[in-house]
Image (cartoon, rainbow, N blue to C red):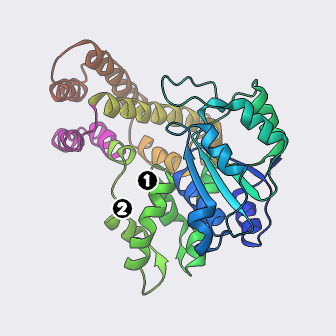
Amino acid sequence: MKKIQYTELLKRLTHNQTDSIYLILGKEAYLEHQIQQAFQALIPKEEQEMNIGNYDMEVVSLGAALDDATSAPFFGEKRLVFIKNPYFLTGERHKGGPNHDVEGLQTYFDHPVASTILVLLAPYDKLDGRKKIVKTLNKQADTVQIGNLNQNQISQLIQDRLQVKNYEISGDALNQLLFRTDSKLSTIMNELPKLMLYNIKDRKITTDSINALVSKSLDQNVFDLSNAVLQKKSKQAIDIYQELIKQQEQPLRINAVLVGQFRLLLQVKILQGEGFSQGDIAGTLKVHPYRVKLAMQTTRKFSMTDLKMGYTGLVDLDLQLKSTQKDPSLLFELFLLQFIDRKIA
């Protein structure tokens, strides 16, 4: 298997350097879209309708894609075939759907057609390496991993995108953008055009513009909610909770994120007490340094007792949400009242 970085793939395609078989592995809509566009650009526009095929394996049979892949280009030099959602390469089982000629694909992998570029778009964390077809694919294909990007990779992609447009972004603004979007690359790339338009005069993306234009993620809303709880600002906490419910967020999901936030605060408090630095804590907990920075600012203001009470109260609230039919908002308000009155065991 030849592993290629996303940026290296785009560079090669720009210079018309292609191989016969590609595996794009992982779920990241923005990168997948960019890759598809780069491949499509290899085919002249006037030839694209006849020489580009898209086949979704959840709807169309593999045989149809293979018929296309083994056909000669129509008045052109290359044929491009996309095979999307090849779930038969994973351990997943799908009921219904078309029958797939996996043996035919195995044969194609062994003897690819020189004039065809076959691209498998597999939005999965991994394939089933025990399968013969996967073993052959791993040997024959150029593989680009686009899923499970770390924070540094996401940050670099953002900066690269802005640099192309002659924009800059400060470290604080970048961290705020990552935090507001839960570090979801596709969401970030959708937000960049309006941020660039807003900052077109100075061509610098600022923290203020991000706060003004980018909606808060669930994580950030819950961060604000946890601070309101800890500060015993009951009206503010209830208002934030009710707003999240209005936004169709599920009570169990809100509470799960709250539990995670309080757990993080406890972990940071403990590690701070043992002399860990911000970077050490981020590395130990595998959490973005900016989240750790915010957590450290919060934990300085509150005791270990407050954090433990909040955490145990939220864990108890989770059990109640799962075991009773009581109104979630009332249960949250009861938790808040007990926390403020320090009645949580």
Residue at 15% in and 23% down = 327
- What amino acid does circle 1 point to? Thr
Please give the name of the residue rendered at 66% of the width and 34% of the height, measured from the top-left corner. Answer: 126
Residue stretch rendered in magenta on the structure: 223-250
* x 74%, y 56%: residue: 116
Measured in 3D between alpha carbons, the distance from the residue under mark 1 to the one under mark 2, in whole angstroms, is: 8 Å
Q: Secondary structure at mark 1?
A: loop
Residue 25 can be seen in this image:
no
Percent x, y of residue 97: 49, 29
Label annotation for residue 214: 2
Residue 212 falls left or right of residue 34: left
Question: Height in image: 271 above or below 158?
Answer: above
Q: Are marks 1 and 2 in contact (CB under 8 Å)?
A: yes
First along the sequence among labels 1 and 2 = 1
Type of amino acid under label 2 = Val
Question: What quarter of the picture does the N terminus occupy?
Answer: top right
Q: Is residue 131 visible?
A: yes
